[in-house]
Image (cartoon, rainbow, N blue to C red):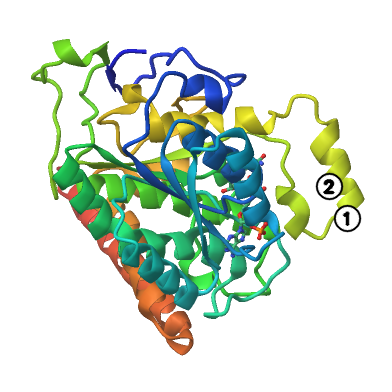
Amino acid sequence: MGNILRATDNPVPSGFGSTSTAEQVTQGIDASGLTVIITGGSSGIGAETARVMALRGAHVIIGSRTTAAGLAAESLKQSILQDTPSARIDIIYLELNSQDSVRDFTDEFLSMNLPLNILINNACVMRCPFKLSEDGIEMQFATNHIGHFLLTNLLLPKIKRTAAETGIEGRIVNLSSADHLTTYREGIRFDKINDEAAYNDKLAYGQSKLANILHANELARRLKAFLSSKSRITYISSEQFTTPKHFHVQQEEGANVTANSVDPGLTKTYLGRHSTISAAEIRAITTCFLWKKSIPQGAATTCYVALHPSVKGISGKYFADCNIEKTSAHVAVHCSSGGSRQSTKLLCRGCRQLAAAPTTTVAIVLRRQVEVVQRRAKKRKATDRDCDANSC
Ligand SMILES: NC(=O)c1ccc[n+]([C@@H]2O[C@H](COP(=O)([O-])OP(=O)(O)OC[C@H]3O[C@@H](n4cnc5c(N)ncnc54)[C@H](OP(=O)(O)O)[C@@H]3O)[C@@H](O)[C@H]2O)c1
Protein backbone atom coordinates (compact mmCIF):
# COMPACT_ATOMS: atom_id res chain seq x y z
CA MET A 1 0.00 0.00 0.00
CA GLY A 2 2.98 2.28 0.56
CA ASN A 3 3.35 5.01 3.06
CA ILE A 4 1.06 7.86 2.25
CA LEU A 5 0.72 11.04 4.21
CA ARG A 6 -2.41 13.03 3.88
CA ALA A 7 -2.56 16.55 5.25
CA THR A 8 -5.84 18.04 4.34
CA ASP A 9 -8.77 20.20 5.16
CA ASN A 10 -10.49 19.28 1.92
CA PRO A 11 -10.77 15.54 1.72
CA VAL A 12 -8.94 13.75 -0.99
CA PRO A 13 -10.58 10.38 -1.56
CA SER A 14 -8.65 7.73 0.29
CA GLY A 15 -9.44 5.14 -2.31
CA PHE A 16 -11.91 3.52 0.09
CA GLY A 17 -15.59 4.19 0.57
CA SER A 18 -18.83 3.05 2.11
CA THR A 19 -18.63 -0.48 0.73
CA SER A 20 -15.03 -1.12 1.78
CA THR A 21 -14.61 -3.68 4.52
CA ALA A 22 -12.29 -3.65 7.51
CA GLU A 23 -10.19 -6.39 5.94
CA GLN A 24 -9.88 -4.46 2.67
CA VAL A 25 -8.77 -1.20 4.27
CA THR A 26 -6.10 -2.99 6.31
CA GLN A 27 -4.89 -5.31 3.55
CA GLY A 28 -1.12 -5.60 3.65
CA ILE A 29 -0.72 -3.73 6.95
CA ASP A 30 1.48 -5.44 9.50
CA ALA A 31 0.25 -4.57 12.99
CA SER A 32 2.25 -7.24 14.77
CA GLY A 33 4.19 -4.72 16.86
CA LEU A 34 1.06 -2.96 18.12
CA THR A 35 -1.19 -3.25 21.14
CA VAL A 36 -4.74 -2.02 20.81
CA ILE A 37 -7.55 -1.61 23.34
CA ILE A 38 -11.11 -1.79 22.03
CA THR A 39 -14.04 -1.01 24.31
CA GLY A 40 -17.27 -2.88 23.64
CA GLY A 41 -15.27 -5.30 21.55
CA SER A 42 -17.56 -8.25 22.14
CA SER A 43 -20.26 -7.45 19.61
CA GLY A 44 -21.11 -5.51 16.47
CA ILE A 45 -18.54 -3.12 15.03
CA GLY A 46 -16.19 -3.55 18.02
CA ALA A 47 -16.08 -7.34 17.57
CA GLU A 48 -15.23 -7.05 13.87
CA THR A 49 -12.61 -4.41 14.67
CA ALA A 50 -11.08 -6.78 17.23
CA ARG A 51 -11.09 -9.67 14.75
CA VAL A 52 -9.42 -7.68 11.98
CA MET A 53 -6.85 -6.10 14.31
CA ALA A 54 -5.93 -9.60 15.52
CA LEU A 55 -5.82 -10.85 11.93
CA ARG A 56 -3.28 -8.11 11.15
CA GLY A 57 -1.17 -9.27 14.08
CA ALA A 58 -1.99 -6.69 16.78
CA HIS A 59 -2.23 -7.71 20.42
CA VAL A 60 -5.91 -7.00 21.10
CA ILE A 61 -7.28 -6.13 24.51
CA ILE A 62 -11.07 -6.25 24.57
CA GLY A 63 -12.82 -4.21 27.26
CA SER A 64 -16.14 -5.93 27.83
CA ARG A 65 -18.76 -6.39 30.49
CA THR A 66 -19.47 -9.93 29.29
CA THR A 67 -16.26 -11.67 30.27
CA ALA A 68 -17.50 -14.92 31.81
CA ALA A 69 -16.90 -18.18 29.94
CA GLY A 70 -19.56 -18.79 27.31
CA LEU A 71 -20.55 -15.14 27.13
CA ALA A 72 -20.03 -12.82 24.15
CA ALA A 73 -16.42 -11.71 24.62
CA GLU A 74 -15.09 -15.17 25.41
CA SER A 75 -16.94 -16.80 22.49
CA LEU A 76 -15.62 -14.07 20.21
CA LYS A 77 -12.09 -14.81 21.40
CA GLN A 78 -12.56 -18.52 20.70
CA SER A 79 -13.92 -17.91 17.21
CA ILE A 80 -11.05 -15.52 16.37
CA LEU A 81 -8.54 -18.09 17.64
CA GLN A 82 -10.13 -20.75 15.46
CA ASP A 83 -9.57 -18.64 12.34
CA THR A 84 -6.26 -17.10 13.43
CA PRO A 85 -4.52 -19.46 15.87
CA SER A 86 -1.66 -16.99 16.34
CA ALA A 87 -4.02 -14.18 17.45
CA ARG A 88 -3.16 -12.47 20.71
CA ILE A 89 -6.36 -11.52 22.54
CA ASP A 90 -7.00 -10.67 26.16
CA ILE A 91 -10.33 -9.76 27.68
CA ILE A 92 -10.59 -7.45 30.67
CA TYR A 93 -13.82 -6.69 32.46
CA LEU A 94 -15.02 -3.14 31.76
CA GLU A 95 -18.32 -1.56 32.77
CA LEU A 96 -18.10 1.95 31.36
CA ASN A 97 -20.94 3.37 33.38
CA SER A 98 -18.97 2.71 36.55
CA GLN A 99 -15.92 4.87 37.12
CA ASP A 100 -14.59 2.32 39.63
CA SER A 101 -14.74 -0.31 36.91
CA VAL A 102 -12.92 1.98 34.46
CA ARG A 103 -10.18 2.47 37.06
CA ASP A 104 -9.98 -1.29 37.74
CA PHE A 105 -9.75 -1.98 34.01
CA THR A 106 -6.88 0.50 33.69
CA ASP A 107 -5.05 -0.94 36.70
CA GLU A 108 -5.36 -4.46 35.31
CA PHE A 109 -4.16 -3.40 31.87
CA LEU A 110 -1.22 -1.43 33.28
CA SER A 111 -0.24 -4.39 35.45
CA MET A 112 0.24 -6.43 32.25
CA ASN A 113 3.19 -4.18 31.35
CA LEU A 114 2.24 -3.99 27.69
CA PRO A 115 2.79 -1.03 25.42
CA LEU A 116 -0.33 0.79 24.23
CA ASN A 117 -0.40 2.10 20.67
CA ILE A 118 -4.09 2.40 19.84
CA LEU A 119 -7.16 3.10 21.94
CA ILE A 120 -10.54 2.59 20.27
CA ASN A 121 -13.41 4.08 22.28
CA ASN A 122 -16.19 2.09 20.62
CA ALA A 123 -18.72 0.92 23.24
CA CYS A 124 -22.04 2.62 23.57
CA VAL A 125 -25.68 2.45 24.50
CA MET A 126 -28.25 4.07 22.27
CA ARG A 127 -31.56 5.70 23.10
CA CYS A 128 -32.14 3.96 26.39
CA PRO A 129 -34.90 5.24 28.67
CA PHE A 130 -33.74 7.77 31.29
CA LYS A 131 -31.50 6.13 33.85
CA LEU A 132 -28.60 7.21 36.05
CA SER A 133 -25.27 5.42 36.02
CA GLU A 134 -23.67 4.02 39.16
CA ASP A 135 -22.03 7.43 39.57
CA GLY A 136 -25.27 9.35 39.16
CA ILE A 137 -24.82 10.57 35.58
CA GLU A 138 -27.38 10.14 32.78
CA MET A 139 -26.64 6.72 31.28
CA GLN A 140 -25.90 7.59 27.64
CA PHE A 141 -23.62 10.50 28.58
CA ALA A 142 -21.99 8.39 31.29
CA THR A 143 -21.34 5.34 29.09
CA ASN A 144 -20.66 6.89 25.72
CA HIS A 145 -18.67 9.90 26.85
CA ILE A 146 -17.68 10.15 30.52
CA GLY A 147 -16.53 6.50 30.80
CA HIS A 148 -14.38 6.89 27.70
CA PHE A 149 -13.17 10.32 28.81
CA LEU A 150 -11.92 8.87 32.10
CA LEU A 151 -10.46 5.78 30.42
CA THR A 152 -8.57 7.92 27.90
CA ASN A 153 -7.22 10.21 30.60
CA LEU A 154 -6.03 7.26 32.68
CA LEU A 155 -4.36 5.59 29.70
CA LEU A 156 -2.92 8.70 28.10
CA PRO A 157 0.44 8.61 29.92
CA LYS A 158 0.90 5.02 28.70
CA ILE A 159 0.00 5.89 25.10
CA LYS A 160 2.34 8.88 25.11
CA ARG A 161 5.18 6.88 26.67
CA THR A 162 4.75 4.06 24.15
CA ALA A 163 4.81 6.53 21.26
CA ALA A 164 7.92 8.24 22.64
CA GLU A 165 9.76 4.99 23.29
CA THR A 166 8.89 3.25 20.03
CA GLY A 167 8.70 6.20 17.67
CA ILE A 168 5.40 4.78 16.42
CA GLU A 169 2.51 7.23 16.31
CA GLY A 170 -0.13 6.51 18.95
CA ARG A 171 -3.75 6.78 17.85
CA ILE A 172 -6.98 7.41 19.72
CA VAL A 173 -10.19 6.72 17.82
CA ASN A 174 -13.57 7.79 19.19
CA LEU A 175 -16.64 6.18 17.66
CA SER A 176 -19.17 8.89 17.06
CA SER A 177 -22.14 8.94 14.69
CA ALA A 178 -23.94 11.08 12.14
CA ASP A 179 -26.49 11.30 14.95
CA HIS A 180 -24.25 13.95 16.55
CA LEU A 181 -26.28 16.24 14.28
CA THR A 182 -29.43 15.29 16.15
CA THR A 183 -28.66 16.73 19.53
CA TYR A 184 -30.34 19.34 21.73
CA ARG A 185 -30.58 22.84 20.32
CA GLU A 186 -27.76 24.01 22.60
CA GLY A 187 -25.49 21.12 21.59
CA ILE A 188 -24.36 19.84 24.97
CA ARG A 189 -26.79 20.74 27.73
CA PHE A 190 -24.36 21.09 30.58
CA ASP A 191 -27.10 22.13 32.96
CA LYS A 192 -29.66 19.48 32.03
CA ILE A 193 -27.68 16.31 31.58
CA ASN A 194 -29.33 14.76 34.61
CA ASP A 195 -32.70 16.42 34.13
CA GLU A 196 -35.22 13.62 33.62
CA ALA A 197 -38.07 15.98 32.68
CA ALA A 198 -36.02 17.49 29.83
CA TYR A 199 -34.68 14.11 28.68
CA ASN A 200 -35.16 12.97 25.12
CA ASP A 201 -33.57 9.57 24.43
CA LYS A 202 -32.76 10.38 20.79
CA LEU A 203 -31.31 13.83 21.45
CA ALA A 204 -29.39 12.57 24.48
CA TYR A 205 -27.74 9.96 22.25
CA GLY A 206 -26.82 12.71 19.75
CA GLN A 207 -25.48 14.81 22.62
CA SER A 208 -23.18 11.98 23.76
CA LYS A 209 -21.98 11.43 20.17
CA LEU A 210 -21.29 15.16 19.80
CA ALA A 211 -19.25 14.94 23.02
CA ASN A 212 -17.22 12.08 21.43
CA ILE A 213 -16.19 14.40 18.57
CA LEU A 214 -15.43 17.36 20.82
CA HIS A 215 -13.40 15.11 23.08
CA ALA A 216 -11.28 13.85 20.16
CA ASN A 217 -10.84 17.38 18.79
CA GLU A 218 -9.75 18.85 22.08
CA LEU A 219 -7.44 15.90 22.72
CA ALA A 220 -5.90 16.41 19.30
CA ARG A 221 -5.31 20.08 20.06
CA ARG A 222 -3.75 19.38 23.43
CA LEU A 223 -1.69 16.39 22.38
CA LYS A 224 0.06 17.77 19.46
CA ALA A 225 -1.21 19.71 16.63
CA PHE A 226 -4.01 20.64 14.38
CA LEU A 227 -3.70 21.97 10.91
CA SER A 228 -4.52 25.59 10.46
CA SER A 229 -7.29 26.52 8.07
CA LYS A 230 -4.59 27.65 5.65
CA SER A 231 -3.10 24.20 5.34
CA ARG A 232 -3.33 22.86 1.83
CA ILE A 233 -3.93 19.34 0.69
CA THR A 234 -0.94 17.17 0.16
CA TYR A 235 -1.26 13.53 -0.62
CA ILE A 236 2.20 12.29 -1.22
CA SER A 237 4.46 9.48 -0.23
CA SER A 238 6.23 9.89 3.10
CA GLU A 239 9.65 9.69 1.49
CA GLN A 240 8.89 12.89 -0.42
CA PHE A 241 7.21 14.63 2.45
CA THR A 242 8.70 17.86 3.63
CA THR A 243 6.76 20.29 5.74
CA PRO A 244 5.54 23.01 3.41
CA LYS A 245 5.51 26.61 4.62
CA HIS A 246 1.74 26.83 4.62
CA PHE A 247 1.53 23.71 6.75
CA HIS A 248 1.10 25.50 10.04
CA VAL A 249 1.13 23.18 13.01
CA GLN A 250 0.41 24.44 16.48
CA GLN A 251 2.30 22.35 18.96
CA GLU A 252 0.97 22.01 22.46
CA GLU A 253 2.29 18.92 24.21
CA GLY A 254 4.21 17.71 21.19
CA ALA A 255 3.18 14.10 21.78
CA ASN A 256 3.32 11.71 18.85
CA VAL A 257 -0.31 10.74 19.40
CA THR A 258 -3.33 11.60 17.26
CA ALA A 259 -7.02 11.67 18.15
CA ASN A 260 -9.84 11.44 15.64
CA SER A 261 -13.51 10.55 15.61
CA VAL A 262 -15.39 8.35 13.17
CA ASP A 263 -18.91 7.69 12.01
CA PRO A 264 -19.07 4.03 11.01
CA GLY A 265 -22.28 4.61 9.04
CA LEU A 266 -25.64 2.89 9.48
CA THR A 267 -24.66 -0.69 10.19
CA LYS A 268 -26.63 -3.88 10.79
CA THR A 269 -25.87 -4.34 14.50
CA TYR A 270 -28.22 -4.68 17.47
CA LEU A 271 -27.36 -1.25 18.83
CA GLY A 272 -31.07 -0.44 19.09
CA ARG A 273 -31.59 -3.06 21.79
CA HIS A 274 -31.26 -0.51 24.60
CA SER A 275 -34.26 1.50 23.40
CA THR A 276 -37.88 0.84 24.22
CA ILE A 277 -38.73 -0.56 20.80
CA SER A 278 -39.33 -4.31 20.83
CA ALA A 279 -36.77 -6.93 19.88
CA ALA A 280 -38.86 -7.90 16.84
CA GLU A 281 -38.93 -4.29 15.63
CA ILE A 282 -35.17 -4.00 16.12
CA ARG A 283 -34.64 -7.21 14.14
CA ALA A 284 -36.88 -5.88 11.40
CA ILE A 285 -35.05 -2.55 11.28
CA THR A 286 -31.66 -4.26 11.48
CA THR A 287 -32.23 -6.73 8.70
CA CYS A 288 -34.66 -4.94 6.38
CA PHE A 289 -32.77 -1.77 5.66
CA LEU A 290 -30.97 -2.83 2.54
CA TRP A 291 -28.87 0.30 2.42
CA LYS A 292 -27.32 -0.45 5.81
CA LYS A 293 -23.73 -1.51 5.89
CA SER A 294 -22.70 -5.03 6.80
CA ILE A 295 -20.68 -5.24 10.03
CA PRO A 296 -17.36 -5.70 8.13
CA GLN A 297 -18.22 -2.52 6.21
CA GLY A 298 -19.25 -0.76 9.43
CA ALA A 299 -15.86 -1.54 11.00
CA ALA A 300 -13.89 -0.26 8.00
CA THR A 301 -13.60 3.41 8.98
CA THR A 302 -12.46 2.57 12.52
CA CYS A 303 -9.80 0.17 11.21
CA TYR A 304 -8.72 2.64 8.52
CA VAL A 305 -8.26 5.49 11.01
CA ALA A 306 -6.60 3.22 13.57
CA LEU A 307 -4.14 1.47 11.27
CA HIS A 308 -3.77 2.97 7.85
CA PRO A 309 -0.51 4.81 7.04
CA SER A 310 -2.49 7.44 5.07
CA VAL A 311 -3.85 8.76 8.34
CA LYS A 312 -0.38 9.37 9.76
CA GLY A 313 -0.18 12.79 11.37
CA ILE A 314 -3.87 13.56 10.90
CA SER A 315 -5.51 14.58 14.13
CA GLY A 316 -8.71 16.25 15.24
CA LYS A 317 -10.66 15.11 12.20
CA TYR A 318 -13.98 13.34 11.76
CA PHE A 319 -14.08 10.44 9.30
CA ALA A 320 -16.94 8.70 7.56
CA ASP A 321 -16.66 6.04 4.85
CA CYS A 322 -12.87 6.13 5.33
CA ASN A 323 -12.57 9.80 4.37
CA ILE A 324 -12.55 13.08 6.24
CA GLU A 325 -16.08 14.33 6.61
CA LYS A 326 -17.65 17.62 7.70
CA THR A 327 -19.15 17.83 11.16
CA SER A 328 -22.18 19.73 12.36
CA ALA A 329 -22.43 23.42 13.08
CA HIS A 330 -22.30 22.55 16.79
CA VAL A 331 -18.78 21.17 16.37
CA ALA A 332 -17.77 24.24 14.39
CA VAL A 333 -19.12 26.52 17.08
CA HIS A 334 -17.53 24.57 19.91
CA CYS A 335 -14.17 24.23 18.18
CA SER A 336 -13.75 27.42 16.21
CA SER A 337 -10.90 29.68 17.14
CA GLY A 338 -11.09 32.32 19.82
CA GLY A 339 -13.55 32.45 22.66
CA SER A 340 -15.92 29.73 21.54
CA ARG A 341 -13.23 27.10 21.78
CA GLN A 342 -13.43 27.76 25.48
CA SER A 343 -16.59 25.68 25.64
CA THR A 344 -14.75 22.64 24.32
CA LYS A 345 -12.06 23.16 26.89
CA LEU A 346 -14.74 23.56 29.49
CA LEU A 347 -16.35 20.33 28.35
CA CYS A 348 -13.08 18.56 29.04
CA ARG A 349 -12.52 20.32 32.32
CA GLY A 350 -16.10 19.62 33.36
CA CYS A 351 -15.81 15.99 32.44
CA ARG A 352 -12.55 15.66 34.31
CA GLN A 353 -14.28 17.00 37.37
CA LEU A 354 -17.27 14.76 36.74
CA ALA A 355 -15.04 11.76 36.40
CA ALA A 356 -13.30 12.58 39.66
CA ALA A 357 -16.33 13.74 41.58
CA PRO A 358 -18.31 11.68 44.04
CA THR A 359 -21.93 11.31 42.94
CA THR A 360 -23.31 14.05 45.15
CA THR A 361 -21.16 16.75 43.60
CA VAL A 362 -22.00 15.91 39.99
CA ALA A 363 -24.96 18.28 39.78
CA ILE A 364 -22.95 21.09 41.37
CA VAL A 365 -20.09 20.62 38.92
CA LEU A 366 -22.46 20.68 35.96
CA ARG A 367 -24.16 23.82 37.24
CA ARG A 368 -20.78 25.53 37.66
CA GLN A 369 -19.83 24.62 34.09
CA VAL A 370 -22.96 26.27 32.81
CA GLU A 371 -22.37 29.35 34.87
CA VAL A 372 -18.84 29.71 33.48
CA VAL A 373 -20.03 29.22 29.87
CA GLN A 374 -22.84 31.71 30.37
CA ARG A 375 -20.56 34.27 32.03
CA ARG A 376 -18.07 34.03 29.17
CA ALA A 377 -20.82 34.29 26.54
CA LYS A 378 -22.19 37.39 28.29
CA LYS A 379 -18.72 38.93 28.45
CA ARG A 380 -18.17 38.22 24.77
CA LYS A 381 -21.50 39.79 23.86
CA ALA A 382 -20.65 42.86 25.92
CA THR A 383 -17.25 43.14 24.23
CA ASP A 384 -18.89 42.77 20.80
CA ARG A 385 -21.40 45.52 21.71
CA ASP A 386 -18.59 47.83 22.87
CA CYS A 387 -16.76 47.10 19.65
CA ASP A 388 -19.84 47.91 17.58
CA ALA A 389 -20.39 51.14 19.52
CA ASN A 390 -16.80 52.15 18.88
CA SER A 391 -16.98 50.90 15.26
CA CYS A 392 -13.99 48.68 15.75
N1 LIG B 1 -24.61 0.45 14.20
C1 LIG B 1 -24.77 1.64 13.66
O1 LIG B 1 -25.58 1.83 12.72
C2 LIG B 1 -23.95 2.81 14.14
C3 LIG B 1 -24.10 4.04 13.48
C4 LIG B 1 -23.36 5.13 13.92
C5 LIG B 1 -22.48 4.98 14.98
N2 LIG B 1 -22.36 3.77 15.61
C6 LIG B 1 -21.40 3.69 16.73
O2 LIG B 1 -20.61 2.52 16.61
C7 LIG B 1 -20.23 2.07 17.91
C8 LIG B 1 -20.46 0.57 18.03
O3 LIG B 1 -21.85 0.33 17.92
P1 LIG B 1 -22.46 -1.06 17.40
O4 LIG B 1 -23.43 -0.72 16.35
O5 LIG B 1 -21.39 -2.05 17.14
O6 LIG B 1 -23.31 -1.47 18.69
P2 LIG B 1 -23.33 -2.79 19.56
O7 LIG B 1 -23.26 -4.01 18.73
O8 LIG B 1 -24.48 -2.62 20.48
O9 LIG B 1 -21.98 -2.70 20.37
C9 LIG B 1 -21.82 -1.85 21.45
C10 LIG B 1 -20.88 -2.48 22.42
O10 LIG B 1 -20.75 -1.60 23.55
C11 LIG B 1 -20.84 -2.38 24.73
N3 LIG B 1 -21.32 -1.61 25.86
C12 LIG B 1 -22.50 -0.97 26.00
N4 LIG B 1 -22.58 -0.40 27.22
C13 LIG B 1 -21.43 -0.70 27.86
C14 LIG B 1 -20.91 -0.41 29.13
N5 LIG B 1 -21.61 0.29 30.03
N6 LIG B 1 -19.70 -0.87 29.47
C15 LIG B 1 -18.98 -1.61 28.59
N7 LIG B 1 -19.41 -1.92 27.36
C16 LIG B 1 -20.63 -1.47 27.00
C17 LIG B 1 -21.83 -3.47 24.38
O11 LIG B 1 -21.71 -4.49 25.33
P3 LIG B 1 -23.01 -5.33 25.80
O12 LIG B 1 -23.21 -6.32 24.70
O13 LIG B 1 -22.59 -5.89 27.10
O14 LIG B 1 -24.15 -4.36 25.91
C18 LIG B 1 -21.37 -3.82 22.97
O15 LIG B 1 -20.30 -4.74 23.01
C19 LIG B 1 -21.01 2.92 18.91
O16 LIG B 1 -20.17 3.89 19.48
C20 LIG B 1 -22.09 3.59 18.06
O17 LIG B 1 -22.45 4.87 18.54
C21 LIG B 1 -23.06 2.69 15.21
Image height of 167 relative to 149, above or below: above
Q: Is residue 326 visible?
A: no
Label 2 Cα crowd, 10 Å radius (few <14 / some 14-19 / many 20+): some
Which residue is disc 1 drawn over?
A: 278
Residue 235 spot, x, y in % from top left:
28, 13
Quadrant holding the N terminus: top left
Determine whether the beta carbon of the residue marked 2 sits less than 8 angstroms from the nearest atom of ligand 1: no
239 relative position to 9: left or right: left
Q: How many marks?
A: 2
Task: Tell me which residue sits at (27%, 16%) in the image.
Answer: 233
Image height of 229 relative to 100, above or below: above
Q: Are marks 2 and 1 in contact (CB under 8 Å)?
A: yes
For residue 197, which quarter of the picture?
Answer: bottom right
Give the residue type that dot 2 points to.
Ile
Quadrant holding the C terminus: top left
Depth check: 244 or 29 in front?
A: 29
Task: Tell me which residue sits at (57%, 79%) in the image.
Answer: 134
192 relative position to 114: left or right: right
161 relative position to 145: left or right: left
For residue 238, which quarter of the picture?
Answer: top left
Task: Tell me which residue sits at (86%, 32%) in the image.
Answer: 288
Image height of 157 relative to 182, above or below: below
Depth check: 26 or 294 in front?
A: 26
Q: CA distance from mark 2 to mark 1?
A: 6 Å
